[in-house]
Image (cartoon, grey):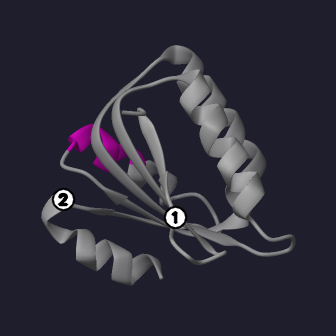
């Protein structure tokens, strides 16, 4: 199984991503590629991020930071579904970023996350 799984959503303005296990630089590059393929020009995206279990490599963290810096203005909403406190804390930090709404949902509330991010 891939560590990152891009789930087809049937919508051009929504990316659904599931992470399992170690999250590497290559996984981040796969996410970036899928983002660029899916995103329509001049449109903003919503992101549903489902984190089952995640450990970041330092290279992945750097790649993630660079992507966020370059593309954060292209997102409207980010819903993070996880039971990990670290991810919840990261979502709270990202919530302070301008023009992006970030909200954490416990795994028991995935349906609420899907409704909110749309």
Q: Which residue is drawn at 64% across and 75% down?
A: 13
Residue 41 location, quadrant: bottom right
Q: Residue at x 56, y 76 (%)?
A: 10
Q: Give the range drawn in magenta.
A: 84-90
Name the spot of residue 46 as percent of width and height, x first.
57, 70
- Find the residue positioned furthest to the right: 41
Image check: 70 left or right of 63? Answer: right
**Residue at disc 2, secondary structure:** helix
Residue 107: assigned label: 2
Within 10 Å of disc 1 (Cα), the crowding (few <14, some 14-19, many 20+) is: few
Mark 2 and mark 1 in contact? Answer it, CB < 8 Å. Answer: no
Asked whether the viewer can see residue 68, the reply is: no
- Find the residue positioned furthest to the left: 108
Work out whether 35 lies above or below 74.
above
Asked whether the viewer can see residue 67, the reply is: yes
**Residue at disc 1, secondary structure:** loop
Label 2 vs label 1: CA separation?
20 Å
Q: Residue at x 76, y 53 (%)?
A: 36
Name the spot of residue 90 as percent of width and height, x first.
40, 44
Residue 8: assigned label: 1
Name the spot of residue 108 as percent of width and height, x first.
13, 65
**Residue 66 belongs to the span the image colors magenta:** no
**Which of 85/19 is in front?**
19
Name the spot of residue 67 as percent of width and height, x first.
69, 41
Image check: 45 left or right of 18? Answer: right
Q: Residue at x 63, y 37 (%)?
A: 30
Q: Earlier in the sequence, mark 2 or mark 1?
A: 1
Work out whether 25 lies above or below 71.
above
Within 10 Å of disc 2 (Cα), the crowding (few <14, some 14-19, many 20+) is: some
**Which of 70/31 is in front?**
31
Most common SS among magenta residues: helix
């Amino acid at each position: 199984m891939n560590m990152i799984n891009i789930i087809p959503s049937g919508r051009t303005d929504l990316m659904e991503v599931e992470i399992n296990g170690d999250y590497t630089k290559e996984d981040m590059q796969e996410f970036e590629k899928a983002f660029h393929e899916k995103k329509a020009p001049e449109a903003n995206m919503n992101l549903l991020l489902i984190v089952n279990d995640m450990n970041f490599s330092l290279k992945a963290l750097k790649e993630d930071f660079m992507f966020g810096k370059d593309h954060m203005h292209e997102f409207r909403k980010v819903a993070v579904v996880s039971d990990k406190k670290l991810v919840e804390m990261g979502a709270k930090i990202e919530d302070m970023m301008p023009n992006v709404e970030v909200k954490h949902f416990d795994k028991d509330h995935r349906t609420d996350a899907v409704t909110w991010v749309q």
